[in-house]
């Protein structure tokens, strides 16, 4: 992929996806600025001459605007991520996930940014019994987190033009290993329980969840940075891979963990009720037809990758360390 830009600003670049994206962008030759509030620190980001790390809040529009000056592309990943974290403090979450978004877009445009990539979420669809949910499906968000993700999308297109090109993507639930690991996402949760408690607890089980490996997420972002303007301008793309039920994912995790740890003879799956009824089957044909993008990393790959990280000792205290759990870390910060 040929570079179209030189200097990138990534908000939320010290998060789960950002921690795998930023090294990839540096390896491609980009000059990268990470702008992040640093709830989880930044020690896991590489020491690199082309990396600048700025601790900042996206609600501080003046500081963000000053930091954005001189950059020609902007990747917006920063948010209070996942429903449980959002609901801890709805006022804070609204100010970050919704109120700060349009001023951020305006600041980027004024700074001379030529491309703006916005990470929305496939959870904007809520519940759907359609066999394939495409980008034109009505948004039926079940939570404010989902709702605000959807509400920000038109706030970007409101300000785009020929010199300020915007693109939105709706990633599926992300899984797999990253330097700033999250263990509060479905595949990662199940794998952690399987490896470290020898039991998989399934909440519900019948809900369909689309999944996307974190590497495929990063590859999609890179593609949005290199694609021609006319192919992505004001477009929305679903980005997902395998659409499976939670129970099917659990059975897959069970199989892989028993293969990775052959000394274990059994691994039980226990089901428990849940009030999380989100269920949808996203279709990602549009991004393949428009840009030739196709994910390469399966859920099985993500589970094996996590098993290897656990075996190496890269993820110690995987139930008690709040570095792996957004809601746990935010609770601690709020209590401090």
Image (cartoon, rainbow, N blue to C red):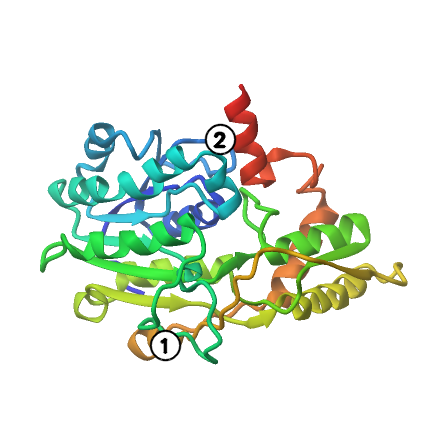
Residue where numbered disc 2 is placed = 41
Residue where numbered disc 1 is placed = 288
Could you classify mark 2 by the number of other residues whose Cα lies within 10 Å: few (under 14), some (14-19), or many (20 or more)? some
Q: Position of residue 334 (x, y in %)?
A: 50, 25
Q: Quadrant of the N terminus?
A: bottom left
Could you classify mark 1 by the number of other residues whose Cα lies within 10 Å: few (under 14), some (14-19), or many (20 or more)? some
Please give left or right for residue 327 compared with residue 61 in the image.
right
SS of the residue under disc 1: helix
Q: Position of residue 79 (x, y in %)?
A: 39, 42
Give the distance between the C-alpha atoms of the residues marked 1 and 2, in whole angstroms: 35 Å
Q: Residue at x 46, y 41 (%)?
A: 86
Please tell me whether residue 84 is drawn above or below residue 328 in the rendered image.
below
Q: Position of residue 212 (x, y in %)?
A: 50, 63
Please tell me whether residue 275 is drawn above or below residue 50 in the rendered image.
below
Q: Residue at x 46, y 45 (%)?
A: 81
Q: Is residue 51 visible?
A: no
Please give left or right for residue 291 compared with residue 216 in the image.
left
State the residue lying farthest toward the left. Answer: 162
Labels 1 and 2: the sequence-earlier one: 2
Q: How many marks?
A: 2
Q: Residue at x 35, y 64 (%)?
A: 139
The picture quadrant where one finds residue 326 is top right
Q: Position of residue 106 (x, y in %)?
A: 16, 43
Label of residue 191 in the image: none
State the residue lying farthest toward the top. Answer: 336
SS of the residue under disc 2: loop
Q: Closest to the observer: 99 or 160?
A: 99
Q: Closest to the observer: 276 or 165?
A: 276
Q: Closest to the observer: 135 or 9?
A: 135
Q: Is residue 235 visible?
A: yes
The answer to whether marks 1 and 2 mark residues whose Cβ atoms lie closer than 8 Å is no
């Amino acid at each position: 992929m040929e570079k179209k830009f030189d200097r990138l600003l990534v908000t939320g670049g010290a998060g789960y996806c950002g921690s795998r994206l930023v090294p990839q962008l540096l390896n491609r030759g980009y000059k990268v600025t990470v702008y992040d509030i640093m709830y989880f620190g930044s020690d896991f980001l590489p020491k690199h001459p082309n990396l600048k790390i700025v601790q900042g809040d996206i609600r501080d529009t003046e500081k963000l605007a000053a930091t954005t000056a001189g950059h020609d592309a902007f990747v917006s990943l920063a948010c209070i991520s996942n429903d449980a974290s959002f609901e801890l403090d709805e006022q804070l979450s609204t100010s970050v996930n919704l109120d700060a978004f349009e001023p951020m877009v305006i600041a980027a445009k004024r700074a001379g940014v030529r491309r703006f990539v916005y990470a929305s979420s496939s959870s904007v669809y809520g519940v759907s019994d359609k066999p394939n949910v495409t980008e034109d499906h009505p948004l039926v968000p079940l939570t404010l987190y989902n709702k605000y993700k959807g509400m920000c999308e038109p706030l970007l297109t409101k300000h785009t033009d020929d010199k300020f090109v915007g693109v939105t993507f709706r990633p599926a639930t992300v899984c797999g290993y990253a330097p700033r690991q999250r263990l509060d996402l479905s595949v990662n949760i199940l794998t952690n329980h399987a490896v470290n408690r020898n039991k998989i607890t399934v909440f519900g089980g019948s809900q369909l969840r689309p999944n996307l490996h974190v590497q495929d997420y990063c590859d999609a972002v890179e593609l949005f940075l290199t694609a021609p303007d006319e192919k992505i301008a004001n477009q929305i793309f679903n980005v997902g891979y395998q659409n499976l039920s939670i129970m099917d994912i659990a059975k897959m995790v069970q199989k892989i963990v028993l293969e990775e740890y052959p000394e274990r003879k059994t691994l039980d799956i226990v089901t428990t009720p849940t009030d999380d009824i989100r269920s949808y089957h996203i279709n990602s044909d549009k991004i393949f037809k428009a840009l030739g993008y196709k994910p390469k990393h399966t859920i099985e790959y993500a589970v094996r990758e996590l098993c290897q990280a656990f075996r190496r000792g890269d993820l110690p205290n995987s139930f008690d360390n709040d570095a792996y759990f957004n809601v746990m870390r935010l609770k601690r910060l709020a209590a401090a």
